[in-house]
Image (spheres, helix red, strand yellow):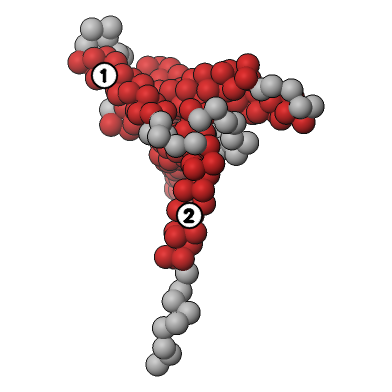
Amino acid sequence: MEPTWLFTGLAGLGGWILGEFGQFASAEVRRLRLKRSIVSELHQIIEETDRVWLAFARSLQIASLRGIDNNLPLPISGMVFASHYGGASLIFTRVQRTAMEMIHSYVTATNQRIAKVQSIVEEAGDISDRGESVEHHWKRYKSALRAAMMTARQTRWYAVYYLKHPDFPILEPEGEQSNEYRAYLDECKGELDRTEKSTSTLTIDDFRNSSQRARMHAAQAEAPDAQQPQK
């Protein structure tokens, strides 16, 4: 009888070990998938900040001509990290987690600035409907656009920085990376100034007509050639 009990005990121990290993492997797979999802979200954040910049660049050109554009980009999404913060705390180190929190704080700040632009556009629309001057709102509008675009660019920089440096070394006040960051912000401000000046020789009607022609040409280029003979 003793060998039977021994075999039974070994079988039970083996089953327990296999069960524990299975749970460990399953947890590791879940953590790996979550980490990939969070990293993928960083790539998405970069793409969406570019979308915000491009959309508001056109709006800034209109603002430089004393107009207000009512086309607004959608907010940037950051739901993966926010929804799985508890799981992320098991994946990333404290420094990495702090970095991720900072990136998503910038995402929130960008979305708040987009909402601010939207609020000004709506206020200006109400005033315009009453036949009143929107001069004051136009100045606020241009200022809000520039602020939103700069915040979007800051968000992008940190997302790119994290992807390039997975251990996310802390930025030293006078380090090489900090100098690159300041140079990057200066270039962004210069790009904003160039965007405003790009319409200096146009009127608002000229700009709208040229934009409409550009969209028509793009649509014609993408459309299939209706005159091409069929084979």
Residue under the point 52% across and 19% down: 143
- x and y percent of residue 20 in the render? 48, 39
For residue 183, the mark is 1
Residue under the point 42% across and 65% down: 221
Would you say 185 lies left or right of 88 here?
Answer: left
- How many numbered discs sit on the rendered protein? 2
- x and y percent of residue 24 in the render? 45, 38
Is 190 or 8 nearer to us in this picture?
190
Residue under the point 54% across and 41% down: 205
Is 118 or 83 nearer to us in this picture?
118
Q: Is residue 198 above or below residue 112?
A: below
Secondary element at tag 2: helix
Query: What's under tag 2, amino acid-wise?
Result: Arg
Query: What's under tag 1, amino acid-wise?
Result: Ala
For residue 22, the mark is none
Note whether residue 101 is visible.
no
First in sequence: mark 2 vs mark 1: 1
- x and y percent of residue 93 in the render? 38, 21
Q: Quadrant of residue 14?
A: top left
Q: Quadrant of residue 42?
A: top left
Q: Residue beneath label 2, please?
A: 213
Is 64 or 77 nearer to us in this picture?
64
